[in-house]
Each structure stands twice: as C-alpha cells, then as structure tokens.
C-alpha cells in the first residue's frame, strides 16, 4: 500500500514543479516586456550604425540582413522599415550608377561608328534608375532620421 501512496504523492509534486516553472517563465516574460523595446532598439541601432562599408556588395548584404530582422516593437519595426527603405534606395542608386559607368567605359572603348543608340539608351536608363532611387532615398530620409532620433533618445545606452 505504501508504494501506491508514493505514486499518488508524485503527481501533485510534478504539477507544483510545472506550475512553478510556468510561473517563472511568465514572470520573466512580464518583467522583460518593458525592456523588449529597449533591447530591440539597441540591437537595431547597433546593426544600423554598422551598415556603412566601402564595398558595395558587403553593404548590400548588411542592409538586406537588417531588413530581414524581425522586431516585436512597433517603434523599432517602423524605424527598420523606413530606414531600410532609405538604405536600399541609396544602394540601388549606387548600383545603377556603377552599371552606367561600366556601360560608358565599354562604349568609350568602341569606335564611334559602333556606339549604338541602344547602348546609349541603356546608359541613360541606368542613370535614370539611379536618379529615381536617389530621389526615393531623399524623400524617406527625414522619416528615417526622425525614427532614429526617437530610438536614440528613448533608448540611449546607459554609461
């Protein structure tokens, strides 16, 4: 009989242990909620401040990685969206300018009789796309700057 009473005693202890574990997880989540935005803001700002790189491909990889990050905070997600859009547009402008430059160099290597209207149109198209991307970046930059300033003001690292 004693063995059965031991068996009966274990389930309540397990339930208590499970309840305690769940309570600790929930308590940790509740206490951490206030810090979630601050943590996400610091992470975003850290990654954002590291975007600049002289190599265009490396910068593209960094911008794409920043844009793929998932943030729960609406404020951080909004900053990510608008600033990611600005940096993506800047990169597109630079990529199209690089493309136009390469096409122009190729055209300059050709004798004047082989410099076709199609090649000129391709160069013009790349330059137009570059300008459009630069205009897009300029249009959204003030919103990005405001979002960054807000995050930095609210969640500046304590020193």
Image: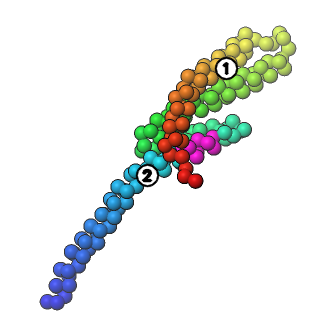
Image quarter of residue 57: top right
Residue 49 % position (x, y): 61, 42
Quadrant of the image containing the N terminus: bottom left
Q: What residue do we see at 67% from left, 20% from top?
A: 126
Per the image, the residue denoted by label 1 is 126
Nearer-the-camera pick, 63 or 73: 73
Does the magenta-highlighted stretch encompass residue 50?
yes
9 up-or-down from 139: above or below: below
Nearer-the-camera pick, 33 or 70: 33
- State left or right for residue 104 relative to residue 21: right
Q: What residue do we see at 29% from left, 72% from top?
A: 17
Span of residues in magenta: 44-51
- State left or right for residue 94 relative to residue 75: right
- Secondary structure beneath dot 2 equals helix
- Secondary structure beneath dot 1 equals helix
- State left or right for residue 61 relative to residue 146: right
Per the image, the residue denoted by label 2 is 35
């Amino acid at each position: 009989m004693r063995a059965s009473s031991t068996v009966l005693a274990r389930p309540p202890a397990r339930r208590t242990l499970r309840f305690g574990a769940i309570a600790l997880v929930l308590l940790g989540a509740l206490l951490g909620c206030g810090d979630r935005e601050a943590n996400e803001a610091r992470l975003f700002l850290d990654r954002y401040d590291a975007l600049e790189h002289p190599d265009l491909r490396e910068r593209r990889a960094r911008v794409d990685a920043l844009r793929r990050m998932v943030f729960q905070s609406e404020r951080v997600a909004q900053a990510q969206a608008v600033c990611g859009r600005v940096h993506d547009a800047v990169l597109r402008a630079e990529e199209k300018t690089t493309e136009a430059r390469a096409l122009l160099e190729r055209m300059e290597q050709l004798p004047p009789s082989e410099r076709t209207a199609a090649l000129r149109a391709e160069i013009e198209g790349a330059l137009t796309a570059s300008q459009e991307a630069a205009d897009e970046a300029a249009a959204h930059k003030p919103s990005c700057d405001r979002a960054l300033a807000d995050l930095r003001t609210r969640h500046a690292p304590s020193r």
